[in-house]
Amino acid sequence: MLPEKIAAWSMRHRAVTLAGWVALVVVALLSGMLLDGESRRSTDPGESGRAQTALNAQNTFDPFRENVLVEAKEPGSPPFAANEELRRATEDLVATLTRSSSVTDVRSPLADAERISADGASGLVGFSIAGGEKDIRPNFETATARVAEVAARHPSARLSQSGDLSLSSVVDKGIREDVKRSELLSLPLTLVILLIVFGALVAASVPLLLAGTSVAATFGFLSVVDDFTPINSATTVITLLIGMAVGVDYSLFFLRRQREERARGHSIDAATRIAARTSGHVVVVSGLTVVLCVSGLVITGLDNFTGLAISTAFVVGLAVLGSVTVLPALLSLLGDKVDRGRIPWLGARRTTAERSRFWSATARVVTRRPALWGGLGAALLILLTLPALGMRLQDPTPAESLPRSLPAIDAAVRTQEAFPGVVYPATVVLTAENGGPVDSPALRSAITDLDRGIGETSGVLNKPIAVAGVDEAVVVRVPLSGAGRDAESDAALAKLRTEVLPETIGKVDGVEYAVSGRTANARDFADRVVERMPLVFGFVLLAAFVLLLLAFRSVPVALVSIALNLLSIGAAYGVLTWTFQDGHFASLLGFAPYGGVVGWLPMFMFVLLLGLSMDYHIFILSRIRERRAEGAVAAIVRGTGTSAGVVSGAAVIMVGVFSVFITLSAIEYKMMGVGMAVAVLLDATLVRGVLLPAFLASLGERAWRRDRKSVAPERVPELSSPNA
């Protein structure tokens, strides 16, 4: 096999192999630093994407808007119009901001009754951040400092600032902190698990070193790729954790098989070649399966998914490459030194790979009555899947995603409650059909009609609206009812797009309009995902089936493997819905339920899990196939028992790594962590130990009828080596 030939060459040329890997990592990191240009912007799909493209074509940009909610701290205080302290605080704030060169277009509730809340308790001061692109951040910080100064001068008034930059800043900060937290938690956690699995410090460090260098090289290459395809911050976190999970898993498969062959009496290099022929082949097939499955995300045509597919392909591809080249060379170089640094009470027991008595006994019981145990196991997974039938796909707003303990999030919640839609308004971009300036008396009259029409549709579209010129375009911000990304907001968006705008702006000749904003972006993104989902699912299932068919030459085995993976994924969907949509364990996991599941997550989980969970199936099936000569049932029992240690260790590592997501701040990451960890856990226990043996026992020799391939790992010529 090719992996064995590559491993043999790597062992004969250890210095070249190891130096080449180091050079690859260094080149990747240097290319990321030296060739890192301007990152490419992501483009939203649908109408919101057209609005974004129209704005990007202007020489200036849509000014960032900020709002300050002015309300009394003490309950039962007089309403805003009759509260002298609130009015003085508002006057002070408006005067302070007006004098500042950092802001422009200050709007006051003292001059505009629409800026007083419906209950009369609070007022809303609005302003834009002044300056060019380089001045935005310092001007925003200056304006925020001025608001804080006014708040300090009026202790009985609560001044809560939220807006475009306030929310984006807290989201960006949360992502940066999540990246750091994932790095700090994933590496030590993985090392501890590896120490338990191998019982020796050197052996545990080898997989961690390979996974870490694969991730580092990937980040370097992605800095260059980012110039052509958008790579966002969330992709960085996902790539880090996926890279650690698969990199360690692949090394674990290889290293445990090499130990097993060493225990049979083979020399180090011969055992390594056997491991390359067997486990190395599994690693290559598994890695190719993951890459092909994740590449299905490209079919969506969404920039963020394309970037995620590229990053996953990079990190998995590098992990596979390192597993069949660097790992054999390193094991050949270390020899028996790989077992140095043994941990007391673990080192002696973990030096060799042993058959699991528990899983062997479980497989033996299951194969005696496969229909019973297979039926019970499938019924349990179907029961876990049932809550997913009520899953509602709904993206959270920043206020729903992040904890309210953050000041900007608390301010956004308060402002949204007092002035629905102001925090997450629809952005209507108006441009001329044939280019040039769009502003005209007819358009201004239509905008007045739009404002009047909004007043007539109270409860769906809200005031106050904001109008701003952006070079040759005009931007109108329209507050929508609802929480920003719920059904009520979607209904308001649809009414704006299909009724209000066509009846006002749509009657002006030569004017084009497109609606964007948080609600519109999320709606258009979800529509694209739903539209392309059948194509993505079909591609991924077909790719997995073809690869399994090529690997095992058995249609029943390929179909059973895919069916079992679908059951575990469905169960993960059910647990995800029951936990986050229905709000169970909210206090334990640190989130506030908002009544939905992130819209892109089910498809992402399907694509990634179908690829990752194939690792276990391919590894177990390979072990079972090696022992076919012993008889169908005996092969299932022994194959399940001998693969248990590797699969259990790999599953614990992957569950541990995905559990790191649960500790992160954003609810999207928590959902991903729970869903992925549950699916892997079910796949490595119930599916691996019960369902797979049951189905294979039911099929008997029919499962392997077309597979004439035999595996005899013991027949390996010895290499002349100082470690032999």
Image (spheres, grey):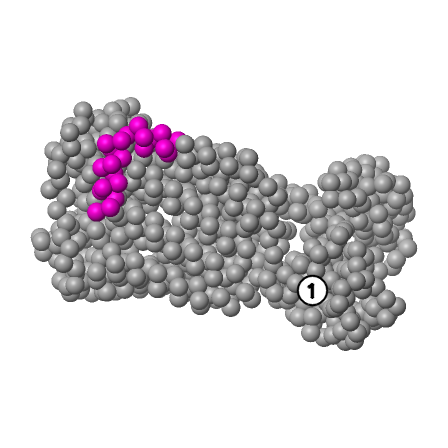
Q: Nearer the viewer, residue 194 or 41?
A: 41
- Residue sitting at x 29%, y 51%: 285
- Give neighbour class at mark 1: few <14, some 14-19, many 20+ (Cα, 10 Å): many
The residue depicted at 38 percent of the width and 61 percent of the height is 540
Instruction: Describe the element under mark 1 as helix, strand or loop.
Output: strand
Q: Where's the C terminus, which quadrant? A: top left
> Looking at the picture, which amino acid does disc 1 mark?
Val
Residue 409: x and y, percent? 66, 47
Residue occupied by mark 1: 515
Name which residue lies at 13% across and 40% down: 716
Bounds of the magenta span?
1-22
For the image, the number of numbered tags is 1
Q: Give the image quarter of residue 572.
A: bottom left
Asked if one can make out residue 373 in the rendered structure from this viewpoint, the answer is: no
Q: What percent of the width, then of the height, locates residue 610?
A: 37, 56
Q: Is residue 526 magenta?
A: no
Residue 328, picture quadrant: top left
Q: Nearer the viewer, residue 241 or 329?
A: 329
Instruction: Give the quadrant of residue 343.
Output: top left
Can you give x and y, in whole percent of width and height, for residue 56 in the image? Answer: 69, 55
Q: Is residue 12 magenta?
A: yes
Left or right of 19? Residue 717 is left
Residue 574 at least partly seen? yes
Image position, residue 637 (x, y; %): 16, 51
55 relative position to 441: left or right:
left
Main secondary structure along the magenta-highlighted residues: helix
Residue 118 vs residue 2: left or right?
A: right
Q: Residue furthest left?
A: 630
